[in-house]
Image (tube, grey):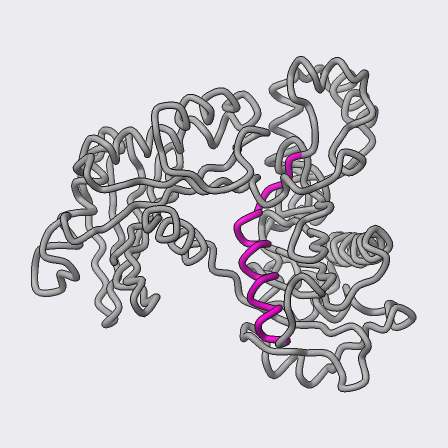
Amino acid sequence: MNILVINAGSSSLKYQLIDMSTEKVLAKGLCEKIGIDGKITHKTHDGYKDEHEANFPTHSEAFQELVKVLSTGEHAVIKDKSDIGAIGHRVVQGGTKFSASVKITEEVIAGAEEFSALAPLHNPACIAGIRACQKVFSSDIPQVAVFDTAFHQTMPEKAYIYPFPYEYFEKYSIRKYGFHGTSHRYVSARLAKLMGKPIEELKIITCHLGNGSSIAAVDGGKCVDTTMGLTPLDGLIMGTRCGSVDPSAATYIAEKEGMTIAQLNDMMNKKSGVLGISGVSSDNRDVSAAAKEGNKRAQLALDIQRYEIRKYIGAFAAAMGGVDAVLFTGGIGENDMAVRAASCAGLEYMGIQVDSKLNEEFSGQEHEISTADSKVKVWIVPTNEELMIARDTLEIVSK
């Protein structure tokens, strides 16, 4: 079965078409500038790449163009849209309603809409993508929602309840939800296979590090804690997000600068983090280059980042009563050997020892990078959220 995986943003539409008999990616691409102008970048498994302007007033036109590039011309990968057996959608916020992926119905869409206030930049776009997809594709093609928050629904109350007056949890569902759940679920399950052990017997700390970063404590295959909270702003310092800070520091700045709540939110989400500290960039590569040239603020941003990763590894080991493996994934986690080395430095007392040669040689690749005598195994495991979404979709529509 061919499964189309969709990640819809407010003005973009990422897609992959996967042949689930082999789990091979037949084609992938990005429709962007939806509602503005329109542009599509399309790649196929044989190395073909096409990039052209297109008219995308809405997501519906983007889906129509997507079908066209998949099914026409000498580089077509399907005959027509009937060759697509099912469609899987990434949905960011599932709240407390969804602890697993589900087949999309009107009730599911209504549930996602209910939690839009908790993810105003994401859920409305996801829902718009689903509605547009329903218009373009036959109702005979089943569609599945895969929620970023679902994997973290196994957290105990002590981990997800905020110490505000309890009424705000009851009235507004204010609690820790966590994000990147599809990635954390994929890489933890993949690592268990690589280690040749049942995931139920493992305590794993998964470090998903990129422009957005989060760490999860996975005990026996279930998430028991994670760094992101009600929104993806919480936890680690990120590219442009501040991560965990004293709330009073934020309100103090707002008062001094005469900021509205919206301006404060924008500052913490888009102007802080590695960008805000370094003053250089939100990209680790640019900041690392600046640090090597002697930029002290760039070095400070990197020091904060690596310190926080190390701190959370220690905290989550304590939360689980031990740890068998630490893995790094995401754009930074997979490709930045300096981040991996510095994040594990000083944790030898926990049995974590990184082999510097392996860390350098296998950067960007799936491989163990700990020393032979390291009690806690350290791995690089590239994530594949699209494949996880496709697997969930296949499982649900095959029932």
In the rendered structure, does residue 54 fall within the stretch colored magenta?
A: no
Q: Position of residue 341 (x, y in %)?
A: 74, 71
Occupied quadrant, residue 221 = bottom right
Which residue is pictured at 74% across the width and 82% down the height? 355
Q: Position of residue 73 (x, y in %)?
A: 7, 59
Occupied quadrant, residue 228 = top right
Q: Position of residue 288 (x, y in %)?
A: 66, 63
Name the outermost residue toward the front.
Answer: 399
**Which region is colored magenta?**
177-195
Assign the magenta stretch its main secondary structure. helix
Q: Position of residue 192 (x, y in %)?
A: 62, 68
Depicted 208 relative to depicted 54: above or below: below
In the rendered structure, does residue 178 fall within the stretch colored magenta?
A: yes
Depicted 382 relative to depicted 158: above or below: below
55 left or right of 276 in image? left
Which sits in the foreground, 14 or 287? Answer: 14
Which residue is pictured at 65% across the width and 36% down the height? 233
Which residue is pictured at 60% across the width and 50% down the height? 281
142 left or right of 377 in image? left
248 left or right of 290 in image? right
Which quadrant does the N terminus fall into?
Answer: bottom left
Which sits in the foreground, 345 or 189? Answer: 189
Name the outermost residue toward the right.
Answer: 349
